[in-house]
Amino acid sequence: MSSTLRDIAPIGPTAAHPGLGLDDYQTVELLAAGLARMHLNRQHARKSLGPEDRIGTSGALPRAWRTAVTRLWWTGLAQLVDWPGDDLDVFAACRRPLDAWPIRLDLTEDDRGQVLLEGDDLSEFAEQSVALAGRQDVEAELVENRVFGLLMAAAQANGRTPEEIQAAYVALRLLLVHQPVLSDLDIIKRVRAMPAATPKGEPYVKDLVRAAYRFQPAPGTVTVRVCDSCGNPLTAPLVRCPVAGCPGQARALTMPTLEGYWVQNRATRRFHHDAGLVEDRLFQRSDALAAQLAEDDFPVRVTLERYPLMDTWDGSLRFTYGDGISECWLFDAKDTVSATLLGRCFSPPPEPEAARRFLVLAQHRATPAYRGDLERELHGRVRGITVIDETTFLRQAAQHARRLGGRA
Ligand SMILES: [Zn+2]
């Protein structure tokens, strides 16, 4: 995951510069954070009070939302547009693409085509904006962050050495990527392999599953319609998988169960499963490269480490040759809707030492326009990072191994 979080303090317009110089990406981030806060409030209300409110139609409005609406009002004033009249105008606009709003926002062309709300749910664009900006008022409560915390806790409790903890982390992290649907029998096996329990006596692994998945009763056996490539459940009549970049189609998955099975909740699916697919493709193809070199008895060996240093980076490739000489490449893989939001928030960790560092883009995102928007945001702020697509990254890794082999 390793999304680098950065808090952006809201900047209010000043009387001296009404509506001028406002950063429209910050306004969008504030709107998304406000919507996320309302969504959480609605979930709390559902638990404690019963009938839910539709998003944003009652209760005190979050500060991020109020700041955003004020900023929109100043922008409207500067553009001589009498909008928004009230909060409901903005709620209605959140369901329309940003380029259909009465005021013009200074966003890239790709981002102008995005919506913030799909029905009553945050869009992928809005959710990623909240996660990337790392707003403190919602961050701690987001399901994906709770899942991340429980993943760390489960790994730490199930290892005695740093290597064991790292191995437990990778196993659980990949569980979320490989198994969006799980039989309760699978969980029993996992708990046997990782039995550490919380002070309340509950296995950590079970806590993690409860936070990341929903239970569905189905004693004995169950057949679920899933994507044959990424494994996400697919509800009929969907035949092709809707996940961006996934080539999969519907197939029937039959599992034996004890009492039922578990299905990932939406936040876990989006932030841990779907976002992890590009990482997993890189892992599998790096392993294939390593196996090929070993099979050819090539003088250079490549070893892949998944999520090194507890997910500081998504992966590292180590090229070893000669008398134990080695060189390390680090990579972070991203599948983010908005190149600009990614570029604004990407801060590569300085550790560990490496010959090269890469930001690898999911192939389906890496259009020339996307790369242009991303590189513009990174320019002058982030140094020593190569932006590259999946296929080119793996080709360069193979070429590099061969080049080193020529020297060995
Ligand atoms: Zn799929």
Image (spheres, rainbow, N blue to C red):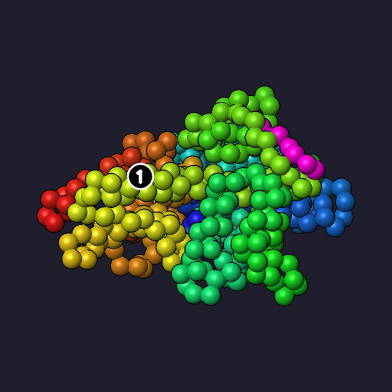
Image height of 260 relative to 228, above or below: below
For this view, does 190 lie left or right of residue 301?
right
Residue 159 in picture, x, y percent from top left: 55, 71
- Looking at this view, name the residue that lies furthest to the right: 50
Residue drawn at 43 percent across, 66 percent down: 309
Residue 91 in picture, x, y percent from top left: 68, 42
Residue 206 in picture, x, y percent from top left: 69, 60
Main secondary structure found in the magenta portion: strand
Residue that mark 1 sits on: 288
Can the viewer see residue 292 in this picture? yes
Within 10 Å of the Cα at label 1, are there few (<14), some (14-19), or many (20+) other Cα atoms?
few
Quadrant where ligand 1 appears: top right
For this view, does 298 lie left or right of residue 138?
left
For this view, does 282 lie left or right of residue 297?
right
Residue drawn at 56 percent across, 28 percent down: 249
Which of the two residues, 97 or 146, is positioned nearer the viewer here? 146
> Which portion, as a residue range, is magenta?
219-225
Q: Does the beta carbon at disc 1 come under 8 Å from ligand 1?
A: no
Residue 327 in picture, x, y percent from top left: 25, 61
Q: Amino acid at mark 1?
A: Ala
Is 222 a magenta residue?
Answer: yes
Residue drawn at 11 percent across, 55 percent down: 407
For this view, does 365 lie left or right of residue 222?
left
Residue drawn at 87 percent across, 55 percent down: 49
